[in-house]
Image (spheres, grey):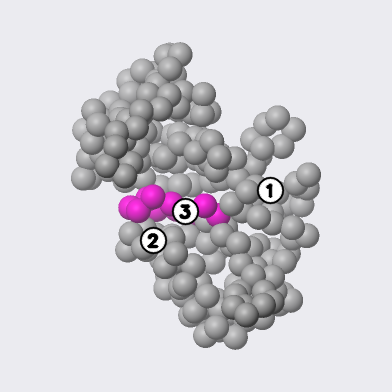
Amino acid sequence: MIVCRYRKRGAYAFVPHVDVLRALCMAIRRSRADIAFSEGFNPHMLLKLSSPLPLGVESDCEYLAAASTDAPDAFAEKLNRTLPDELRILCAARADRANPAADIAAAEYEIVLPGFDCAALARAVTEADAFAVSYTDRGETVTRDVRARIYSLSGAGDRLRAVLGYGNANVRADRLAAQLCGGRLPDNAVILKKKMYTMLGGGLVDADKVYFGGTEIK
C-alpha cells in the first residue's frame, strides 16, 4: 500500500470529489503506474481517498492510498507527469495500512475573511458554551450545535485558524465561516485546508507523522 498527500488548488477546488477520483484513475492509467484491481464482474482500482471537500475549499493535505507495488517516489513521479499542477502529489510513502477517510479525525484550516475582525469572531465562539450553525440541506434548514467539535479557533486581522472535527464529527469550514459572517460566506473569502489529524491516545496527531513518520494507527 502506498499513501500519498496531494493538493487540490485553483480550479480543482470547484471539481466534485467523484471527478477528482476519475482524474486520479485516469492519471494512473496514462502513467502506467502499477495498481491492483478488485475482483468480480466490475473490477475497479483499489484506491482510498480522504473524505470529500466542499466545493470552493482548497487543500494542501488530501490523502490517497493505493494498492501498488511501485516504489512510493516512482509512483508519485509517474502520476505527476500526467496530473495538472493544481492536483499534484506532494509526498508518498509505503504504509502497512491506510484508510484516509476513516483515519482522519480533524482538519486545520486557514480562513481569510476580508473586512472582518477575526480575533473578535474567534472570541465569540471560544468564550461560548454553545455555537449553532444553520444551513440548508435538501431544501430544509438544519441547525446544529458544533461547539464541541471546534477543537481550536483563533484569529488575527482578517484570518482565522480553525481546527475542526472531521469524518463522523465533521464541521464544514465554509458553513462555520458563513455563520460567523452573519449567515452568508463573502464572495472574497478564501478557505485553505492546511493539515489533517488522526486521533491517537486521546489527542490529535498530524496525519503526516502517521503516514510518513511511522506512527502506528491501532
Of the two numbered discs 1 and 2 on the same chain, state the one appearing first in sequence.
2
The earlier-in-sequence mark between 3 and 1 is 3
* SS label for mark 1: helix
Instruction: Say few, some or many: other residues with alpha carbon within 10 Å of mark 2 (under 14 / 14 to 19 / 20 or more).
Output: some
What residue sits right under mark 3 in the picture? Answer: 52
* Residue 172 point in image, percent of width and height: 42, 40
* Three-letter amino acid code at the position of disc 1: Lys
The quarter of the rendered structure image containing the C terminus is top right
Q: Amino acid at mark 2?
A: Pro
Quick check: can you spot residue 118?
A: no
106 on left or right of 139? right
Q: Inspect the magenta stretch and tell me whether residue 110 lies in it.
A: no
- The three-letter amino acid code for the residue at tag 3 is Pro
Question: Depth check: 201 or 76 in front?
Answer: 201
Q: Which residues are magenta?
A: 50-61
Left or right of 139? Residue 9 is: right
Which residue is more in the foreground, 46 or 76? Answer: 46
- Does 182 appear above or below 61? above
- Quarter assignment of residue 73: bottom right
Expressed as whole percent of the image width and height from the top left, the position of residue 56 reads 33, 52
Q: Which residue is mark 2?
A: 16
The residue where tag 1 is placed is 209
Tell me the distance, in whole angstroms, between the alpha carbons under discs 3 and 2.
Answer: 8 Å
Q: Nearer the viewer, mark 1 or mark 2?
A: 2
Q: How many marks?
A: 3
